[in-house]
Structure formats: structure tokens, C-alpha cells
Amino acid sequence: MRSVTLKAPAKLNLGLRITGILPNGFHSLESVFSAITLADEVEVAISDGSRGTSLRCTGFPSPEGPSNLVWKAAELFRAETGYTGSIYIRLHKNIPSPGGLGGGSSDTAAVIRALVKLTGLEVDVIELGSALGSDVPFFAGGFSHAVVRGRGELVEGCSVPEFHAVLVSSGERIPTPVAYSLWDEGGGHLTEPWQISNYTALNFGVWHEGKPFPVRLDNDFLPVLSRRFPGVERAAGILSETCVNWGLSGSGPVFYALYPYEKEAVEAEENLSGKFPWVFRCRSRQIGASSNG
Ligand code: C5P
């Protein structure tokens, strides 16, 4: 049996704009995705013989059968490549789900990458992954930071200044499809896509006058979700009173507050602990940096 163990990082959405509705019912977005040091751990092992696929999950609860995205990733890999050996997956979940942090997509990308490495069989990791989740192309491409557009398949690497982050969750369960249908029902207005100058400015992004980026951290889901989920509304209220740079990640319910220095993040963590069911401090993941927070 041969095995590979990978970290599957979470991402934050540093601003999220819904810019269109696609013919297939999906929405087009524009967002800066930023990988952080909070990560799941994925171990994939293969062996000859056909004992099928098996999955063991620890940490935050995650289904241990075919409904798990990582299982689907393994099956799709078999279908694409004809691989028939045994696939054993061990998943340790540190990323809350659903959280808006892309945990499932990141795990999926990690499994596909691990299978390519272990079997030596070629697949288009990004194409295979995007069939499983809209956020997979970002993770499958191995980016630290990127401007993501379309349904999630248009990914352009960018630079983002290093930051420390405190994450908080309202603890409410908000599956992604629910967030999108609430946005649809609310007659959500579309936000104008960025001008090209925003992309240029982003790549010179440094902490300046207390602001991390030439990027607004607004998230188009926030007004919609605040109306339906009291915990989201409460979290937004607490963060707007106590933090300068904060936002909702993806379709929630995890929020983040960003700081240039660790000391400020530690103070914020102390201040926010006890006010939310889950609080976690981490930092941006820069290429080549240790992924252990
Ligand atoms: O691809 P993912 O698993 O993230 O999508 C879950 C659901 O969220 C989709 O079935 C779709 O209803 C909605 N979605 C969307 N537009 C996106 C991403 C997701 O409408 N860009």
C-alpha cells in the first residue's frame, strides 16, 4: 500500500460580488479567494486488488460514505482513468462545513491530486474537480490567492499582503444552495464587475492606512442572510462595532476579521471568544510557508 498525506487549506472570500446569472442557473461571481492556514488533513492510500473505496472521517462530522465529495472525487477519478485498485481515504476535518470556507472543495482537490501522484495516471485536475464543486478549481490550481470569476472556473493568481485573521461562526447551518436560493428569492441585484484597474491595483496590495487591500470586503450574500439568520445579523453587528476589516466568507456562516499584526489578532480573539460557538485564529497562507498556522 502506498500513501500520500496532504493539507487541504480553507479559503476566505475577500469580498464577494454576484455579477450574473448563468444559463445553467449557476451564478457568476467575482471574488478574491485567499488560502489560510486553517486546513483539513487528507491521507490517501492505494493498493492493488479491488476492495473498492473506503473513507474514515474524524474531527468535525462529515459523511463516511458515497455522499461525501471526496468519495465522489475518487469515483470520478476511476471513471476518468479506468483505475480499479483500492482507494482508502482518511479525512480529518478542522474546517467547519458548511462554513463558506471551501473545506469540501479543498478536500476534493487534495484527493484528486493525491490520486494522480500515487497512480501516475493523468487527469485534468481542474476540469475533474470543477465537476464536483465550484470552488475546486482554485484549490486544484494550488493558488494562495486569486481573483476568481465565472462560476469559479476563471482563476487568476494575484498577490495579497500577509494578514492574520480571526474567524467566528454564528453556528447556523447554511448550505450553499440555500444561500443562493435566498438571494434569488430576494430578487438580489447584480453587482457591476470590476474595472481592469482594480485587478492591477490588487497586485500592488499592501497594508495602507489600516486597510489591507484596494478591495472592498463586502459580500452580496450578507444582507440576504442577515434577514433570515439571526446569528448572522448578530455576528455582523458585533464585528462592525469591534473590528475595522471584516467580512463574511462565501455563503457563510463563518466571518473573518483581518489584522496586519499577530498581536492585534490575539487581542481580537480574546475579545471575540465566548461571544460565538466557534472562534479560530489563523493567518494567510503564503506559497512556501508552513501550513500549520
Ligand atoms: O458547486 P457548489 O457545490 O459550490 O454549488 C452548490 C450549489 O450552489 C449549486 O448547486 C448552485 O445551486 C449554487 N451555486 C451557484 N453559483 C455558483 C456556485 C454555486 O448558483 N457560482
Image: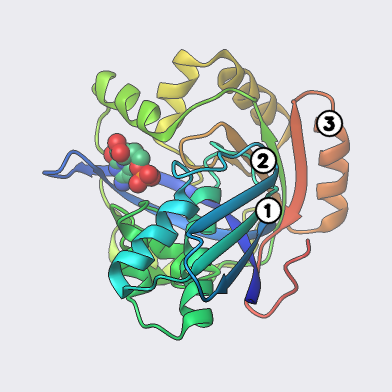
Could you tell me if residue 272 is visible in this image? Answer: yes
In-front residue for pair 125/73: 73
Residue 269 placement (x, y as % from top left): 83, 40
- Residue 91: percent from left, percent from top: 64, 54
Cα distance in 3D space between marks 1 and 2: 8 Å
For the residues bearing labels 1 and 2, Cβ distance under 8 angstroms: yes
Question: Residue flagged by tag 1: what amino acid is it?
Answer: Gly
Instruction: Classify the position of the N terminus by image quarter.
Output: bottom right
Q: Residue at x 69, y 35 (%)?
A: 168
Nearer-N-terminus badge (1/2):
1
Residue 210: numbered disc: 1
Q: Residue at x 51, y 43 (%)?
A: 65
- Between 166 and 176, the residue placed more toward the observer is 176
Asked which secondary structure carries label 3, the reply is: loop
From the viewer's perspective, is 215 left or right of 199? right
- Residue beneath the point at 62% across and 77% down: 287
Q: Tell me the crowding category of disc 3: few under 14, some 14 to 19, or many 20 or more residues within 10 angstroms, Cα based.
A: some
Could you tell me the amino acid type at mark 3? Ser
Left or right of 233 in this view: 285? right
